Amino acid sequence: MSYKKVVVPLSVSGVQKLQDELKIYQRWQKEKAVELAQRLAMLGASVASIRFSRAIYTGPKNATVTVEAIPKGYRVKANGESVLFIEFGSGVTYGSGHPEAQEFGMGPGTYPNGKGHWDDPRGWYLPKEKGGGHTYGNPPAMPMYEARKAIEQELPRIVREVFSGD
């Protein structure tokens, strides 16, 4: 919606006309806010999906990214057994480097509670049901972190696009 000048007489009908114009403007703002939230969520989901699919990970990549409508907007959500391993990395060799790992209680030695072979310099073998094979772990691909960064970076451009159109 472009700038609009409303000229009304100073009367009851003029004030009513002004109120009607404000209601139209409020409805437009709400529609655009929903559009903005949806576009940002879709951008985040796209970035996360691509990064999950391209991640270096020895086991089966079963991460799925969805966009869910919630009462005040949208949520980008990643589900799957491999999500945390891909997001934060694994093993002492490759399992560090995510800037928010400590904040979320992740990082080398946190799964499974410092047990297992995460710190074995010879690596470890995955169970057959998890794809089998030898690994030293995997580097953090940070799909959700990078999705948030992409949203933050593109926010001004998308706001302009959404709110400049009718």
Image (cartoon, rainbow, N blue to C red):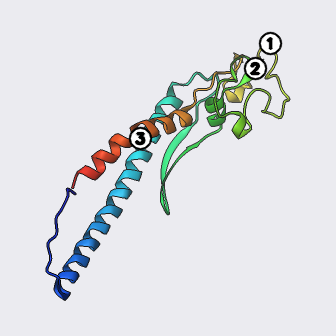
CB contact under 8 Å: marks 1 and 2 = yes
Labelled disc at residue 43: 3
Locate residue 21, reporting x and y percent.
Answer: 22, 72
Q: In the shown orientation, is residue 18 left or right of residue 129?
A: left
Identified at 62% across, 30% down, the residue is 86
Looking at the rendered image, the quarter that the N terminus falls into is bottom left
Q: In the shown orientation, is residue 86 left or right of residue 47?
A: right
Under circle 2, the secondary element is helix
Identified at 28% across, 45% down, the residue is 161
Labelled disc at residue 121: 1
Circle 1: residue type? Pro
> In terms of sequence position, does the residue under pointer 3 or pointer 1 come before the other?
3
Identified at 28% across, 63% down, the residue is 28
Can you name the residue that lies furthest to the top here?
122
Query: Label 2 crowding class (10 Å Cα cut-off): few <14, some 14-19, many 20+?
Result: many
Q: In the shown orientation, is residue 21 left or right of residue 95?
A: left
Locate residue 118, reporting x and y percent.
Answer: 79, 23
Q: Quadrant of residue 16?
A: bottom left
Find disc 2 in the rendering and name its residue: 92
